[in-house]
Amino acid sequence: MQAFGINVPLMVMLTYAGGAGPAAIAGVLAAPIIQITPLMGSNLIIVVFAVVVIGGMGSILGSILTGLVLGLIEGLTKVFYPEASNIVVFVIMAIVLILRPAGLFGKER
C-alpha cells in the first residue's frame, strides 16, 4: 500500500481507533445499567463460536448473515418458547454441521 502513497501505520492506527472508540463509548454507556466485570463477555463466547462455525470458517459475510439470522431466531424462540431459547443456536449448529460440515458459506476442502 505504501507504493500507492498510503501511510500504512497511520491507517492501522485509525482502524484501531475506529474500533476501540465505539467500544469505549459502549462501555461508558453500559456502566450505569449493568455491573462491569472483567468476565462480562464470557457468556457470549460460546454463541459467537457457534455463529462462526455455522457461517463458515474464514467467511466474514457468512458470520454476519448467520449472526443476524440466529439473533432473529433466538429472539423469536424467546417469545414463543422461552425454555428452548438457550439451546436453539446449538441445535441449528448441529443440523448445519451434519448437512454441511464446512458451514453455510465455508469452502469444502
Image: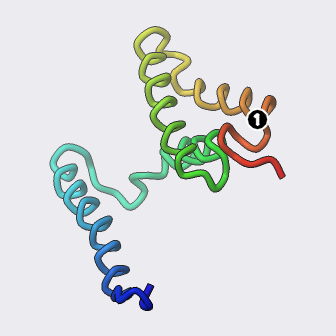
Q: Secondary structure at mark 1?
A: helix
Indicate left or right for 102 with 16 as reference. Answer: right
How far across and down, in percent of the image, does residue 66 sit?
Answer: 54, 36
How far across and down, in percent of the image, does residue 31 sit?
Answer: 20, 53
User: Outermost residue, right direction?
Assistant: 109
Which amino acid type is marked by label 1? Leu
| Total count of labels | 1
User: Where, by quadrant of the figure, is residue 92 drawn?
Assistant: top right
User: Outermost residue, front direction?
Assistant: 4
Indicate left or right for 68 with 91 as reference. Answer: left
Q: Quadrant of the N terminus?
A: bottom left
How far across and down, in percent of the image, does residue 37 sit?
Answer: 34, 57
Placement of 81 over or under 90, stated as above or below: above
Q: Nearer the viewer, residue 21 or 10?
A: 10
Indicate left or right for 77 with 31 as reference. Answer: right
Placement of 7 over or under 92, stated as above or below: below
> Which residue is rendered at x = 51% and y = 22% of the image?
85
Give the residue pinned by disc 1. 97
Q: Nearer the viewer, residue 15 or 52?
A: 15
How far across and down, in percent of the image, does residue 100 sit?
Answer: 78, 35
> Which residue is rendered at x = 70% and y = 46% of the image?
106
> Which residue is rendered at x = 37% and y = 80% of the image?
12
Placement of 105 over or under 57, stated as above or below: above
Indicate left or right for 81 with 57 as reference. Answer: left
> Which residue is rendered at x = 48% and y = 16% of the image?
77
